[in-house]
Amino acid sequence: MQLNSIIKPTFFYTTVAHLARIAGCFRFGGRFLSAAVYSSVYERIHIIELPKDSATTWILCFFTQDLVYYLGHRAVHGNFSHKAGVLWSFHQMHHSSEYYNLSTALRQGVVQDFVMVLFDLLQALVIPPNIFIVHRYLNLLYQFWLHSNAVPYLGPLEYFLNTPSSHRVHHGRNPYCIDKNYGGTLIIWDRLFGTYEPERRDEEIAYGLVTPVASFSQIWWASKIQSHQEIEFQVKAALWPPGYFPGMQTKNFFLWLCMKDSTEGIPEVYLYFFLVIQYCQVGHRACCLRLVRQSSSPLSLMVSI
């Protein structure tokens, strides 16, 4: 199998270009907000004082963090107590790719973490701040390797761990894949709450959104939004279930398997040139944030972000 068949240059450029913008903008701000606010909230609302050096506390935090992530992940999919498209809009960027590899993990919605903060703060009832921060980012780091087509079914590990096989189902747009496998590190929550679905060996998974974007251009998203100016449709798109279209009560999954245009459109040499520029942009913003952090208060840092 050729590398180009696994990682398309246009796909990779779109992902990294998006990452370059969010790295110095809202996404870092959401995670900073979670870490900065957690200590203050913990001091005010925690109901028990757990020993910070106890192995039991660390194990409890591991399971608590994973459960909270599961609930938050369901929420941004618009599949919690009420299905709301506005929450899905924060997360659908992550599912927009029709290719599935490690760079897919970098596609993240710019304001998604501001929603996840609300679920993170639930842990402040019992979990000390230092332990929360460690498990919050270990949980996130674990999920990176899940975005791979190269790792096969892992046998007994599939019963309790979230694996690439389980997460491939989560990213699929086949009818059996919709609203399944929300787990972070563990898959036990999906099994417990009825959202688990194993990968089917007799049916190849088609990745991406149910209605594919059919474009590598990020400007396409702006033109798509501007095409619906009616206030009624905008309100329904926010409050009705994900997939709502004007004139439809719900989104049906007919003709779910759409053909992809395999043409690249832009010569690869130009894509790599733009890719280098985006990496330089990320480095420049990181240096600026470091300088601001050394000379400013946390509030000033948030404003600069």
Image (tube, grey):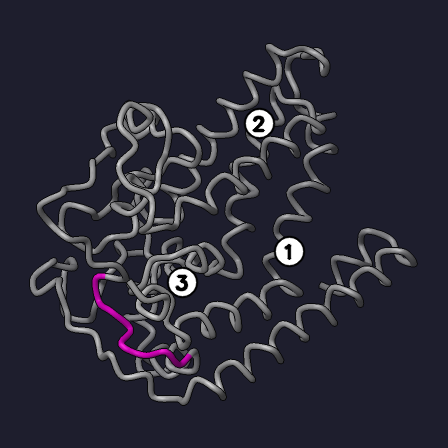
Secondary structure at numbered mark 2 = helix
Earlier in the chain: of badge 3 and badge 2, it is 3
As drawn, the label of residue 93 is 3
Secondary structure at numbered mark 1 = helix
Give the dominant element type of the magenta stretch: helix, strand or loop.
Answer: loop
Rendering coords of residue 83 (x, y %):
29, 47
Q: Is residue 71 above or below residue 204?
A: above
Q: Quadrant of residue 123?
A: top right
Q: What's the residue type where badge 2 is placed?
A: Gln
- How many residues crowd mark 1 within 10 Å: few (<14), some (14–19), many (20+)? some
Q: Quadrant of residue 252?
A: bottom left
User: Are the two marked residues, 1 and 2, in contact with CB atoms closer than 8 angstroms?
Assistant: no
Earlier in the chain: of badge 1 and badge 2, it is 1
Tell whether 286 sits left or right of 269.
right
- How many residues crowd mark 2 within 10 Å: few (<14), some (14–19), many (20+)? many
Which residue is painted at 62% across and 62% down in the image?
23
Secondary structure at numbered mark 3 = helix
Which residue is painted at 36% across and 50% down in the image?
148
Mark 3 against mark 2, which lies toward the viewer? 3
Q: Is residue 214 above or below residue 106?
A: below
Position of the N terminus, as image quadrant, is bottom left
> What residue is pinned by disc 1?
28
Q: What's the residue type where badge 1 is placed?
A: Phe
- The stretch in magenta equals 210-217
Position of the C terminus, as image quadrant, is bottom right
Mark 1 against mark 2, which lies toward the viewer? 1
Q: CA distance from mark 1 to mark 2?
A: 20 Å
Q: What's the residue type where badge 3 is placed?
A: Met
> What residue is pinned by disc 2?
123
Q: Is residue 278 above or below residue 135?
A: below
